[in-house]
Amino acid sequence: MAHLTITASAADQIRRVLDERGHGLGLRVSVKPSGCSGYSYVLDFADEAESEDTAFAEHGAQVFVAPDALEMLDGSEVDYVNEGLNRFFRFNNPNVKDECGCGESFSV
C-alpha cells in the first residue's frame, strides 16, 4: 500500500487555502510528462473525492493522489516552505532519480 505524509506546514496551508475558497476537501496531486527530466507535479483543489484517487490525511488536511501518480509519489512527504519571497509546496520524493536544473521536472 502506498504511503504519503503531510507536514504540519503543508496541512496548515491546505486548510488556509480551502478556508479562503470557502469549499473543497483538500489538495489533489497528479503528474504529467513535462520538462527536460520527464515529469512535473500538477496541483489542484479536490472539491470532491474521485473514485480512483487515493486519499491521505494528516494534521487535519487531505491530499488526494491520482492513480497515475501513486507509484511515483509512494513514500513522499508533502511540505510547504518559505524561501525568501517564495512560498510553495515541496515534494520530498525518495523515488526521484534526477531533477532538471530549474527544479520544474523530475525523473523516477
Image (cartoon, rainbow, N blue to C red):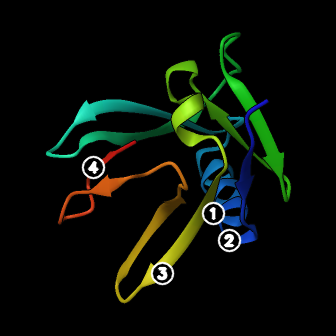
- Tell which circle, 1 or 4, labels the residue nearer the N-terminal end: 1
| Image position, residue 100 (x, y; %) | 21, 58
Amino acid tagged 3: Asn
Q: Is residue 108 left or right of residue 65?
A: left
Instruction: Please name the residue shown 72% across and 57% down the image.
Output: 6
Q: Are marks 1 and 4 in contact (CB under 8 Å)?
A: no
| Image position, residue 104 (x, y; %) | 26, 54
Name, please, the residue furthest toward the bottom.
84
Kindly identify which residue carries mark 1.
13
Q: Secondary structure at mark 3?
A: strand
Q: Are marks 4 and 3 in contact (CB under 8 Å)?
A: no
Kindly identify which residue carries mark 2.
9
Nearest to viewer (mark 4 / mark 2): 4
Q: Are marks 2 and 1 in contact (CB under 8 Å)?
A: yes
The crowding category of the residue bearing disc 1, from other C-alpha atoms within 10 Å (few below 14, some 14 to 19, many at least 20), is some
- Tell which circle, 4 or 2, labels the residue nearer the N-terminal end: 2
Kindly identify which residue carries mark 3.
82
Nearest to viewer (mark 4 / mark 3): 4
Q: Is residue 56 left or right of residue 69?
A: right
Instruction: Please name the residue shown 55% across and 55% down the image.
Output: 94
Amino acid tagged 2: Ser
Q: Is residue 76 left or right of residue 84?
A: right
Nearest to viewer (mark 1 / mark 4): 4
The C terminus lies in quadrant = top left
Amino acid tagged 1: Gln
Q: Are marks 1 and 3 in contact (CB under 8 Å)?
A: no
Name the mark on residue 89. Answer: none
